Amino acid sequence: MRTTTTPATARVAIPAQIPGRKCWAKALGAIDLHGRGGHAVEGPWLDRGGLYDLRPGLLLLTVERRQGEDDRALTATLWRVDPHVEGGLDLVKTWRNKSGRIGPQIIKGLHTHLSKARSRKRNPAPYPLREYTPVNPKPRRNKYTRRCYRCGTTVAAGTGLISRDERGYRAEHEVCPPPVNRYAGHCLHCTGWIEAGQGILLPTGPTEDDLLARAVAFSQGEILETPQRWRPAHDGACPAVPAPRPDPQTNRWAGPCELCWQIIGPGRGALKGPRGDRHLIHPDRCPDNPLNPDGAPTWVVHERTLGDAPVSYDYPAGTIARVTLEHGPGEGPGWRELPEGRVSVIGVVIAALRRRHLDGHGRDGETVTTLWRVASPAEAERVLELEARRWAATAVAARARELLALLPGARPADAVHPPAEQLEDTALVGLAQVWLPRGAARPETRVHVDEANALVWTVVHNSADGDDWALSNWGGYIATAHPLTEQRRQLLDDLRDLQ
């Protein structure tokens, strides 16, 4: 009796690409009956034209589709790995579809053949990766510009290699170039200065701090891995005369000048101080601030807040407002002396800056910095006028609370609180109304003038929680009549002037 021995693997040649057609190949791992098109076929990708060592009995699928506008016919071929067949592949079935897609009929057919193969234990699952080992794969050039998956730099079209993993194609350099230095520093070889982006990075050994940290960890019974260190170096031969470190260094990002608080663009400022404590300033002298053309004395106000809490002077540059200054000027528009050596004056914001910060407990907050100068009389005129109006409104509001019943349960001695029956025929809504300044009474309070009867009526809302509803005599309101005396007539004239 003759017996045949089946080898553990078979050398398989995947059919090559067909010019003018879109071709791909997969080893069948599973079929998703709910999937659409090629997404229903699960399994590792295989390169067309490549050689693989595959286990006998595995099923492979090759697909070719025409690329014409009117002809997009698709051909799907199912193969079985057979070491006794030339090329290692035995044809199982071929499907054709004129629409150019893998339709439900093809998906069901693949599922049927895969189920039968596994029932005969020819194609068991899952498949280890070693069963799809390529044999001497040919390097493939990238047709398109991509990013190298190893070093992250750009691979120009035709200069790199293309490979495929479970997620698709990926490009890489034949030999990745050394990374470019993102930060300026001293050259590893000649100690000359290299600006950012002008050199390359080379790996170096552990530093003294790394060795000390590793020794301390080893003494405590731990193994500490030393991180990879990189140093900038010249790309090629170092210059005969090493470049000195520029002093001061330029800024890479825009930021405010620490002296005048004006914004300095990238590369236009100077960084002073040691590493970790750098301060950005103008390289020569600070330019004239257009909001302070005469170079008047200035004062800086710093305010720190946590979360979204408001600050007192959250003003943009150019704002004219009253400000309280520590050790401020001795004079100026609206000047007032405050306790503890502080001064209140009308000023102009000539620079403003907001910065995020974390306090000692890790809470997020903001630091608002404003730079002020004393406003000129012309600049402060509008602010002083508004302040005078507010002071006048405050004084008139105080007089109104003395002469009129503006709060529930409080009324002057000559005011009359008539019962509700007497107000049934009184038309208060049709009387002339005078508006009260903000803060003088409740927002719903109204003042009506009855010139014919020489009366002033106040209507106060009395339906809030805590109010004595028994005082209401006009719905949910308290209506009070006041004689129209000379003092009240003057009060009404002042109230009209404020409107």
Image (cartoon, grey):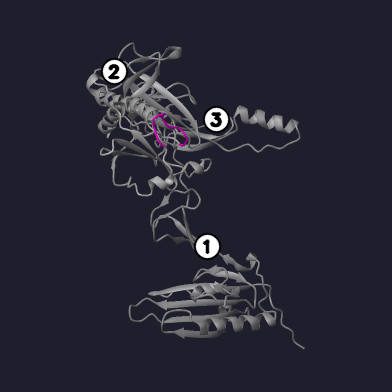
Q: Mark 2 Cα within 10 Å, few/some/many (few <14, many 20+)?
A: many
Mark with earlier residue (3, 1):
1
Q: Position of residue 349 (x, y in %)?
A: 32, 26
Which of 112/152 is in front?
A: 112
Q: Earlier in the sequence, mark 3 or mark 2?
A: 2
Q: Amino acid at mark 3?
A: Asp
Vertically, is 144 above or below 246? below
Disc number lying in front (3 or 2): 2
What is the spatial separation of the Cα atoms under label 3 and label 1, in whole angstroms? 45 Å
Residue 394 x/y as whole percent: 35, 27
Mark 2 to mark 1: distance in Å?
Answer: 72 Å
- Provide residue 227's location: percent of width, then percent of height: 60, 37
Instruction: Say whether residue 110 is visible.
Output: yes
As shown in the figure, which amino acid type bears the numbered disc 1? Answer: Arg
The numbered dot on residue 359 is 3
User: Residue 167, labelled with which disc?
Assistant: 1
Label 1 CA crowd tier, 10 Å (few <14, some 14–19, many 20+)? few
Q: Which residues are magenta?
A: 408-416
Tell me the distance, in whole angstroms, between the alpha carbons under discs 3 and 2.
37 Å
User: Do tag 3 and tag 1 residues touch (Cβ < 8 Å)?
Assistant: no
Which residue reaches farthest bottom? 1
Disc number lying in front (3 or 1): 3
Question: Marks 2 and 3: in contact by CB < 8 Å?
Answer: no
Q: Where's residue 248, x and y in %?
A: 38, 22
Q: Quadrant of residue 245?
A: top left
Task: Provide the secondary structure element on which disc 2 rests.
Answer: loop
| Nearer to us in this view, 434 or 213 | 434
Q: Residue at x 49, y 53 (%)?
A: 149
Q: Which residue is mark 2?
A: 333
**Quadrant of the image containing the C terminus:** top left
Per the picture, the main secondary structure of the magenta-coloured stretch is loop
Vertical comparison of 55 with 317: above or below:
below
